[in-house]
Amino acid sequence: MYSQVADVDDVEKLLEALHIANQLCQYGYFFPVSDSKNLLVKDDSSLYRFQTPYYWPWQHRHPDNVDYAIYLSKRTLRNKQRHGLEEYELEALNSLKKNLQNKWDFITMQAEEQVRLAKERKKGEKIVSDSQERAYWRVYRPPPGYLNYIEPAPVPNRSRGARCKKRSLEDLNREFPIVTSLSAVSSDSETSSTPQYSAFTLIGHGALYDE
């Protein structure tokens, strides 16, 4: 009986460890070496590499389309066999060219400069750096059908909420005018009756005199 309880406890700990590991992997703190699409931790002999702190989500700003365009353009300038774009990346690059026409000269210049700097690194450094950068973009620009785990939440527009609140108060005043009218009538009635009873009340008389 004890061994069965211990086995169940071990399984629960293993599942919890896998869950935490998958969370860290999906948020980009480490990544699988041999799988560039699935950000999953497997209970086998698969190899994983820790991401460089530069690419950690908590200290790196959310990339924009210009950053992504530079990354894709840079890969088109390198060895196609090792750095060639996948179909969804080619479609993204073509779309970015149309949407960022006025910035494309700058994007091309940045891509060429980064390729030039990469050539100055040692082979081992380039392999590690390329895998880290690809894993980074796998998190922020996942392939079709894959979840984006760190997509930023929409920011509410406070001014719009204030306008809606103001309109709702105006609508209430239009929809319930009888309440305002009754309040006014009640107030007038209380005011007109006050002199009749003021002699017998402390509030209306103002003070209590000794005889």
Image: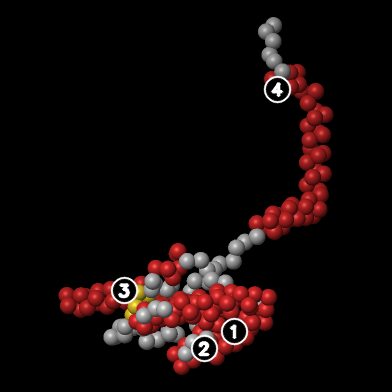
> Quick check: 32 left or right of 145?
left
Label at residue 17:
3
- Residue indicated by mark 1: 93
Is tag 1's residue or tag 4's residue first in the polypeptide sequence? 1
- Mark 2 near mark 3, Cβ–Cβ under 8 Å? no
* Residue found at x 44% / y 79%: 118
Residue 74 image offset from top left, x and y in percent: 52, 82
- Marks 4 and 3, Cα distance to the nearest angstrom? 73 Å
Amino acid type at circle 3 is Ala
Q: What SS does tag 4 mark?
A: helix
- Viewer-closest of 102 and 186: 102
Residue 7 image offset from top left, x and y in percent: 22, 78
Is tag 2's residue or tag 3's residue first in the polypeptide sequence? 3
- Viewer-closest of 66 and 163: 66
Q: What SS does tag 1 mark?
A: helix
- Marks 2 and 4, Cα distance to the nearest angstrom? 86 Å
User: Which of the two marks, 2 or 4, is nearer to us in this view?
Assistant: 2
- Residue indicated by mark 4: 203
User: Which of the two marks, 3 or 1, is nearer to us in this view?
Assistant: 1
Amino acid type at circle 2 is Leu
- Viewer-closest of 136 and 156: 136
* Residue found at x 35% / y 74%: 50
> Quick check: 106 left or right of 148?
right
Amino acid type at circle 4 is Ile
- Mark 4 near mark 3, Cβ–Cβ under 8 Å? no
Residue 115 at least partly seen: yes
Label at residue 85:
2
Residue 126 image offset from top left, x and y in percent: 39, 81
